[in-house]
Amino acid sequence: MTTAKVIVITGASSGIGKAIAKARAAKGDKIVLGARREDRLQQIQKAIEQANGTATYAVTDVTELEQVKALAQQALDSYGRIDVWINNAGLMPHSLLIEAKVDDWNRMIDVNLRGTLYGIAAAQGIFHEQNEGHFINLGSVASLYSHAGGAVYSATKWAVKAISESLREEEAQAGKNVRVTTLYPGAVKSELVSHMTDPARREATDKFYDQFAIPAERIAKVVSDVLDMPADATLNEIVIRPSKQVQ
Ligand code: NDP
């Protein structure tokens, strides 16, 4: 039997974050949901409570450090500790570099990269004080290879890989029992593609996803496996692709 954990999830209003929230709430964990769309967070909290689970939420834009800190504080105020912090919020508006969609570049840098750093900034001190904690960072197979149209998304996800590797090493040196896991998923059904700003690219990606993408629950299953690992060992890096996805 495992002890209930307090799990903070950024980007919990849809897709992978929502699936992790529901799966772990069903296992008895206490979930702290963070994202910008309050109506979605309310619906998910309600669904978890209707299934006899425990959840709270804080409207959070991960590009605002104070809001990310407030999400951590919400977890402490509600449940007294944080066992797991999942840096999951992200977006993927692909475009060619030559198109110079600078606003999209900046949004990816702000959410995927800066948001991950802000999550670390908000939770690390709490983990050290508790002498225990677990970061789970969402990279992507785009952390491992790049392609035409995916430069900035890949750059932000490579950055997540780099940050996670350094964080793991620093935490091991600190000896504070803080674990670090990075996930590198392939195509997963979610709202990620629907937020792409280039209609032609969105349509092409939609077609690719329709063919291959796996349900977000597969990633939730991996997270559960990661969390159920005894504390003396950590699954540090996991690549999970649809079995038929080539790259
Ligand atoms: P979704 O679009 O379904 O979910 C993205 C989540 O991020 C939403 O809950 C959204 O909530 C949140 N978000 C976006 N911007 C912000 C912000 N500024 N502040 C706080 N939250 C924000 O996509 P996925 O579930 O697929 O994506 C989750 C993570 O998984 C991302 O990091 C993505 O890069 C990664 N990933 C996804 C893959 C896939 O194929 N789906 C593959 C590999 C990695 P809201 O709009 O309410 O703020």
Image (cartoon, grey):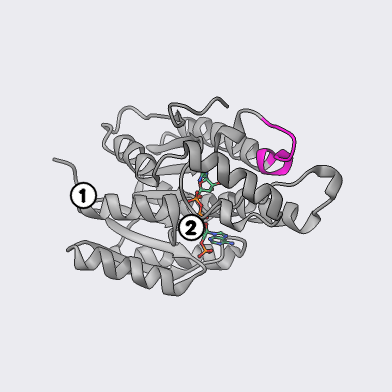
Position of 117 with respect to 1 (left or right) is right
Position of 223 with respect to 115 (left or right) is left
Percent position of residue 170, x then y: 53, 34
**Mark 1 and mark 2: span between their CA atoms?**
20 Å
Helix, strand or loop for disc 2 = loop
Percent position of residue 74, x then y: 39, 68
Classed neighbour count for the residue bearing mark 2: other residues with Cα under 10 Å, few (<14), some (14–19), many (≥20): many
Is 77 situated above or below 193?
below
**First in sequence: mark 1 or mark 2?**
2
Task: Name the residue located 64 percent from the left edge and 54 percent from the top edge.
Answer: 196
Q: Does residue 150 show up?
A: yes
Amino acid on which the number 2 mark rests in the picture? Gly
Is-magenta flag for residue 22? Answer: no
Is 41 situated above or below 137?
below
Task: Name the residue located 59 percent from the left edge and 54 percent from the top edge.
Answer: 115
Magenta highlight range: 146-155
Ligand 1 within 8 Å of the CB at mark 2: yes
Q: Which residue is mark 2?
A: 11
**Quadrant location of the C terminus in the rendered image:** top right
Label drawn at residue 91? none
Q: Which residue is mark 1?
A: 27
Q: Nearer the viewer, residue 155 or 241?
A: 241
